[in-house]
Amino acid sequence: MARTKTSARQTLLDSATVLLAENPGASFIEIAEAAGVGRASLYRHFPTRDDLVRELCLEALKTMDEAVSHIYWTAKSSAEALEMTINAMVPLGDRLYFLTRIGEVTDKQVTKEMTRQNKDMLQLIEGAQKEGVLDATVTPRWINGVFTGLICTAWDAMAQDQVSANEAASLVSRSLLKGLSPLPQDTLS
Amino acid sequence: MARTKTSARQTLLDSATVLLAENPGASFIEIAEAAGVGRASLYRHFPTRDDLVRELCLEALKTMDEAVSHIYWTAKSSAEALEMTINAMVPLGDRLYFLTRIGEVTDKQVTKEMTRQNKDMLQLIEGAQKEGVLDATVTPRWINGVFTGLICTAWDAMAQDQVSANEAASLVSRSLLKGLSPLPQDTLS
DNA sequence: TCCGCTAGAGACAGAAATGTATCATTCGTA
DNA sequence: TACGAATGATACATTTCTGTCTCTAGCGGA
């Protein structure tokens, strides 16, 4: 029973993530219809629309964190960690896409977790720069922006069956690592 | 008088573009306040909210078209055209950002123009692939997605005074051309 | 100074979205 | 079969947004 309840809730979250990523202003009834449930039922799970959005953000952040948090302890280099992060994040592109599209969320817990994950990503990028894998003359923030854009593009391509997850991940790696590797005169590692 | 009217209208369009790009669901009163005019005045310029969004889309598409249409007749190669397009588009990143964020627009004229410009961009990319500047084994659509993401990232960085327009454009060129240039075994031109 | 145009403010009605409550039904389980 | 939990449908009040209208004030030109 508990499992059924959980998976029903998860189904709602998945459905709403996709819908709200495409249309952040979708009404509660549209969200319910897209999930195939009644509006009243959706209200039973999420008291208000803001609660729903908050839960979606937290779920997205949690999923992403679970997918990449182990990498810190596993990877032997920043380059490897970057590669692993890309592979882990491409299938979660819908979550990242959602977070970039949903607009500002005032909830403190959400903003705190977003800030933390962003900081982790910047540190990873800086590590890769120190290792000479990424150009140190480009700001980590720019690289992070390119990274985010690439993941979203990759997921979009995946969602339309243009490429497989592996192909998408390899395209992201290539675009990022080749595009932002140190310039020839800087290369020495 | 006519000039004043036009520039007032342009001010409204500029303001609304920025606001709606950040928050596509902003209400009419929020748009009016952001522009510093009364709600009734905004209605005098744009009879309905949909009209406003339509005008914003058309203005964005027209501005982008005017910035790049001459390139076709000027550039001596696809590589040069790509470079010129990047330079022309980076300062218009707010328009592209707006169009990617506003969601689907049902207006036929808008969708037609968007389709046309998209097709032109894909042709440009295919030309660059034939010239060996971009990897022909990657789909033009993927490259276009990366291009769009890079322009938006660049504009975001510019808007926050992190980089100048020239620096941003050069970062986009580099990320795109290096990241998606043909792989070594493919290089022969 | 007077006239005409435009913008701002506010009232108003209609539409849509939000949130609450109730009731009948269904479905799994004892 | 009988019970309880969950769902769907529906009605309802409240709020927000939309679009229209009117009135007043400001501003430039004759």
Image (tube, coloured by chain):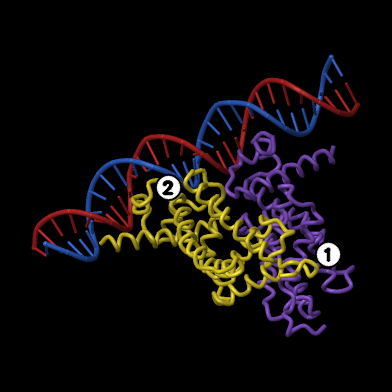
Chain colours: A yellow, B purple, C blue, D red
Classify mark 2: residues with Cα within 10 Å, few (<14), some (14-19) or many (20+). some
**Residue drawn 70% across the image and 43% down it:** B15
Q: Chain of mark 2?
A: A
Image quarter in which the N terminus of chain B is found: top right
Q: Amino acid at mark 1?
A: Met
Q: Quadrant of residue B189?
A: bottom right
**Could you tell me the amino acid type at mark 2?**
Asp
Q: Position of residue C16 (x, y in %)?
A: 49, 48
The residue lying toward the viewer, choosing from B162 and D30, is B162
Quarter of the rendering containing residue B74? bottom right
Chain letter of disc 1 in the image: B
Eyeballing the image, is A180 above or below A24? below
Tell which of B143 and A73 is nearer to you.
Answer: A73
Q: Write down the residue under mark 1.
A: B84
Q: Secondary structure at mark 2?
A: helix
At x 36%, y 56%, the residue is A38
- Label 1 secondary element: helix
Residue plotted at (79% across, 56% down): B167
Q: Are marks 1 and 2 in contact (CB under 8 Å)?
A: no
Residue D24's spot in the image, x, y percent? 68, 20
Residue appearing at x 51%, y 43% in the figure:
A106
B103 horizontally vs B46: left or right: left
Does B189 appear above or below B24?
below
Residue that numbered label 2 is attached to: A51
Query: Badge 1 local density, few (<14 within 10 Å), some, or many (20+)?
Result: some
User: In the image, is C20 to the left or to the right of A153?
Assistant: left
Task: Provide residue A29's location: percent of width, then percent of height.
Answer: 43, 53
The mark found on residue B107 in the picture is none
- Determine the CA span between mark 1 and mark 2: 46 Å
